[in-house]
Amino acid sequence: MLVRRTPDIGADRRSVQIGGQPWVLTTSAEIPSLEDAVDYVCVSYAWGDRTTPHPFNEHASMSDRTMPALEATARSQHFSALWVDAFCIPLEEPARAQCLRWMGAIFARASRAVVVLSEPCAVALEQIRATQGVEAAALPSLDDDPWVTRAWTYQELVNARSVRFVAEGRSTAWADGDELLDYVGHAVKRYGEEHGLDVHEIRAKYRRLDGLEDLLLDWKTADYMERSAYQAVSSMHRREAGRPDDHFNAMVGAISPAPTAVAPLRAEHPADHFMRVCEANGDYSFIYTAGPRSTASGRGWRPVAVDRFQAVLPWHSFGEGQSAKVHSTHIELNGMWRLRPRPTAQTAIDSTERWLRIGHADHTQGDVATRLLARLRLAGFLGCGEYMELAEGFFYSQSPLPTDRQVVVAVATGVRMVHGAPALLLREGESEIHDLCDVGVFIGKVPDAGDVICVR
């Protein structure tokens, strides 16, 4: 932790100047524990590519954005202690790895997280302070900012009690998280109305800005809604990580704001550790990711460890997650809605048509299934494009559909999206244990509850 230098703390140590005052790096014995240190502020920023010498370690370097980020933080508010990664994460293993696993808790227990954006974003923040709004001309600077694309910044923001946005440079403007969400959202909506764009076309135009809005919505609802593993994987879509373990450690911090007791095993792949943390939380919604599956007997439902998980549809989702019980021969999934292939009912087509039109300028051509696929593509769906008609809606598969169609679709009711949910394509088994064929997304109205389905 960084604290102001006083005669009692750090009088004979190296210091850095922040806000015109000397600050020193303390040891854990000199400051209260995380549980008691309610007045410290965490700083969240994107490192960038350039480095500069580390002021507290002559053998190390740090981002050249660290000190400007601290100065911008000092201009926005008063604080008694600071936590910033460049100074407060140990450089040596295993202390470094342990600290990274605690990042969610560190940000959750801070009095505030200060997000430092690049200097061009100051225009938008100044407009919020002066006019309680954001002009369309300021949106590209927010969309260009690298902060929203970094893996670590996801868990840093969603775990924070309070969030304030500032910008590098000389501007003193700032905006709290709920202000930025409201005013940017209104600006994006106005832009769409003025240019005849629906919400998904705007998402495609301003991908980073869309990610920022989803991130702020995730943070705003964190107190009263569960964050599922699927939601964390979706939120990491298009985010960049220097190493695979950064990607998965960030998701672990997002779903476990308290230090997790599930320590990594020796030589364990980061993806396997993430899944074990999810399982300890009672949430198996990581199964709704694209990619290869285990070939072990009874484990065909479990994704193989890869360097990055891809949600079947990286839309904003909600719900408590996917509860389940694992057996040696299969997994018992709760809350699954079982559907069989059959022509789509007109009521489901009409409902989906209304959903396509609500608040949108639907420019796509063709039947409802074709227009749905175009909408899914804008949202990041990478499946093959084939779909299966169901009486209740449409299932879009990740891989080509089987030709025999002796299958059922199992839709998750604990992981929901607007007008849809992730789903599994299953081949029915004689013993009521089904084989997993594929994952995909169901589009249609989803009920609030479902039944138990066994999958191997």
Image: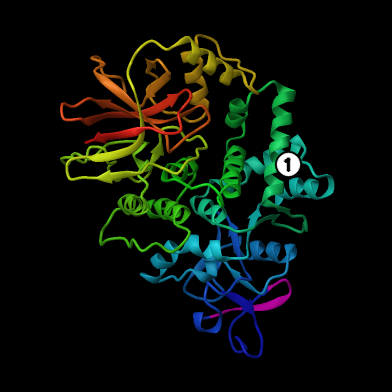
Left or right position of 435 against 156: left
**For this view, does 41 lie left or right of residue 172?**
left
Dot 1 alpha-carbon crowd within 10 angstroms: few under 14, some 14 to 19, many 20 or more:
some
Bounds of the magenta segment: 18-26
Q: Type of residue at label 1?
A: Tyr
Q: Quadrant of residue 139?
A: top right
User: Horizontal placement of 95 versus 25: left or right?
Assistant: left
Q: Position of residue 445 (x, y in %)?
A: 48, 24
**Pointer 1: what residue?**
183
Quadrant containing the N terminus is bottom right
Tell me the chief SS of the magenta region: strand
Indicate whether residue 138 is drawn in magenta: no
Nearest the eye: 7 or 326? 326
Residue 410, picture quadrant = top left
Residue 158 % position (x, y) = 55, 52
Residue at 59% x, 82% y is 14
Q: Residue shown at 62%/39% (left/top)?
A: 209
Q: Is residue 25 magenta?
A: yes
Q: Residue at the spot x=51%, y=26% of the render?
A: 419
Along the line of sight, which residue is nearer the eye, 61 or 99?
99
Place residue 182 in its image quadrant. Answer: top right
Viewed as shown, does residue 81 lie left or right of 342? right
Asked if 377 appears above or below 21 in the picture, the reply is above
